Amino acid sequence: MTLSLSDPTWYPIASSDDLPFRHVYQGQLLGRELAVWRADDGNVNVWENRCLHRGVRLSIGINEGGELKCQYHGWRYANRSAGCTYIPAHPADAPARRIQNRTYPVREAYGLIWSAANDEQAFRPFAGAEGHDWFALRPMPVNAAPEDVLAALAGLAPDDQPADLLPGLAVRFGGTWYFVQPVDAGRAVIRGLLREQPADAVATLRHYNETLSKLRDRLERAAARKPAPEPLQPTFEKLSADLATMPDIAIPRGNTITVVVRRKWTSADGVIGFELAARNGHLPTFQPGAHIDLHLPNGMTRQYSITNGPGELMSYIIGVKQESASKGGSKVLVETVREGDLLSISEPRNNFPLRRDAVRTVLIAGGIGITPLLSMARFLDKSALPYELHYFTRAGEQVAFRGDLEALHGKVILHTGLPRAEIGTTIASALGQWSMAQHVYVCGPGPMLETVRDTATAQGWPEESIHFEYFRNDKVIDNSSAFDVELARSAMTLHVPSGKTIMEVMRDAGLTVPSSCEQGACGTCLTTVIEGEVDHQDVYLNRSEKASNTCMMTCVSRAKSARLVLDI
Amino acid sequence: MTITLYDFELSGNCYKLRLLMSILKLRYNIVPVDFYPDRQHKADWFLRLNPFGQLPVLKDDDLILSDSGAILAYLAKKYDESGQWFPNDPAVTAEVLRWHAVADDITSTASAARLALGFFYDFDIEKAQKGAHRIFRLMDEHLWFGEREGRDWLCSPDHPTTADIACFPYVMLSEEGGISRQDYPALRRWTDRVRRIPGFMVMSGIFPAGRAAEES
């Protein structure tokens, strides 16, 4: 028998006990090294044991509970998805969503962690697995060919009780099952299971350990007399070029995901919580500060920040303000959407990335603005980074996600019912004077944003240390220009007269154009520019993105040149 | 008291003392000794301090000491008020010294392989690697059963001792000698525990572990 790199069989690769709190286990299956770690939510991750960045083993990395941090340059990867959530060399940017490490299928059962080289086969319990309280023996690594190990194990069976050879390099006799983990062509681990808990666990473990140690020594002496088999040669997929460089901007691809409303509840006076769960598997990786577009039953699209902590990908939790029914979006959600309903959401996008290299992080939330900041606080919390979260509400009953806030270990300060004048002085003392590597993140009503920005500036905080997310564009839009747009993919040229937006003209021509805020704040209508000079009037793109002249918002931005060519 | 450590930054044996002094919050001066490539540990001035020509050497006022295991015992007995790092109990003392001897075996195997691969020493690499694997296997078994029996450390007390400090560095640096620890999961978990001791410090090639806080 020769081992195959593409063998789809499920093999045990570790004991459940091998994965204590915040540990990273180093394993190997069929020549491929694995980094195996249990997140704080109990989920076990089996990943290729190399960081996408420089190939350093992730098994020497740090298990932060919801993310695994590479020891070399600190790239962090999320529990479940292995998506990259932070790159310290680009602290002010959200990493592209598609940076994702190689994962392997995993199942924890019968005291063992099982995995396979690929997901061609669904996990199936071994024959006779169900209905027993399994007891795992001490695993025994052996430097010998897996098939030789299996044969030797079968030879342990007493004469009157011959061994049953089972599929997947396993053997059984009496109440003992032995599984051979094919580590490599010349290496194996014997993983034994007893069908029931023994009376004296330690004595039983020592007994089997002695038997298997002797077997190992015999096998290794025999293996040493033979030529060593050639190790398996797994190939490592190269990264694509677009992954190997930081993209200037992530263009939304328009993919939508269907989610189930698992839970809808009143989180506080005026705030409704929604838990949106994946229908199967997990949801995509997100970073703190990220939001999703929620496509509402009435055809509208609204943005909501994800409140989750690191590696929490089984569902997204959002908060919706009850009375903000200006355009009918939240109203539909609050009044008509029920538990069990299906909704369509976009992949998460992040216009509000959190730096994790600050010596001091101040988070300031007003009302429903708590949602992205709760997520940020949770990420900082897991990494034991210092932060102060100031949460302003008009009344105590309006404090949303109270239980989640109480579970945080950092400094959380609730400011309820402050008179307007006091809000200003409270913000001023919360900020203090700026010094190196301090950052403030603010989310809340427009006047609060302005107060924080003005106060911070007055107290010496530079522009790049003040972070906020626009939900509204307050600029006066100059729509006086007139120009032509050529839609490259639609093979159409349209004239945009003064007084009309590109989006309106495209819609008049019968095109379907996704949009949400239609004031240059949300990013939904982001479009790739092929040719021409853009007259940016949005608040979504930052200065360097605008200067790149490669993308634009068609709802408010226009052309400086006579002609624009768009990738539509 | 003035403590001076004659130190080579990349030496695991010198690091043992830096580590214990960091844990015990002791202040000390460092005299760098260029072990490689200058071989200053064989220079006349150094041989006058330690005729065996080995690092580290520690001076405490006028007292001159050599051998990392002996110095660990000295520092613990003199400066550790808790008495936990080198316990007085005769049976535990024997246990600790037993593991100090294992630490020396790790030095002559795992560290020798590292010197051969990283510092161009003319040693039998394969023999050194095999020797290290033999010791690591025994340590893994000892620590694996320890976990089952409620013992987190090499010796029986419910706290670390100088035995753990003495064995730790060249276990952690073994990959620089081409010795993988993949087959020793309990040994790897023990290195997490050592790296979580309050006052732990790193050296080149030895990284911090994640926190084990907020366990619930």
Image (cartoon, helix red, strand yellow):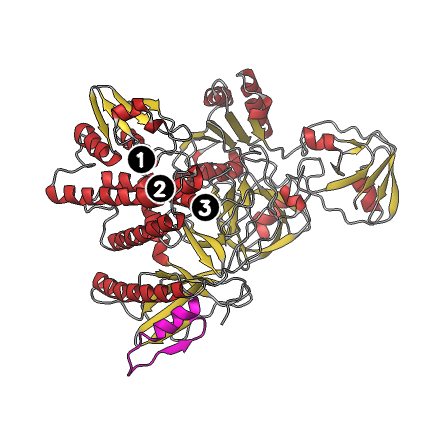
Give coordinates of residue A565: x percent, y percent.
83, 40
Marks 1 and 2 sit apart, C-alpha to C-alpha, by 10 Å
Left/right of residue A5 with respect to residue B34 in the rendered view: right
The image's mark for residue A348 is: none
Q: Nearer the viewer, residue A219 or B167?
A: A219
Residue under label 1: B13
- Residue that extends furthest to the bottom in the rendered view of this protein: A160
Type of residue at label 3?
A: Gly
Left/right of residue A369 with respect to residue B88 in the rendered view: right
Q: Is residue B199 above or below residue B95?
A: above
The image's mark for residue A66 is: 3
- Residue that extends furthest to the left in the rendered view of this protein: B90
Give coordinates of residue B146: x percent, y percent.
24, 52
Q: Quadrant of the N terminus of chain B?
A: top left
Type of residue at label 2?
A: Ser
The span shown in magenta is: A145-169
Give neighbour class at mark 3: few <14, some 14-19, many 20+ (Cα, 10 Å).
many
Residue drawn at (50%, 37%), measured in percent from left and top?
A376
Whether residue A147 is in magenta: the answer is yes
Tell me whether the residue at label 1 lies in contact with that at label 3, contact meaning CB atoms closer than 8 angstroms: no
**Under tag 1, what secondary structure?**
helix
Tell me whether the residue at label 1 lies in contact with that at label 2, contact meaning CB atoms closer than 8 angstroms: yes
Marks 2 and 3 sit apart, C-alpha to C-alpha, by 35 Å
Give coordinates of residue A260: x percent, y percent.
55, 56
The image's mark for residue B111 is: 2
**First in residue order: circle 1 vs circle 2:** 1
Whether residue B111 is in magenta: the answer is no
Query: Residue A471 falls in which quadrant of the image?
Result: top right
Q: Nearer the viewer, residue A111 or A174?
A: A174
Please identify, in this view, whether the residue under mark 2 or under mark 3 is nearer the observer: 2
The chain identifier of the residue carrying mark 2 reads: B
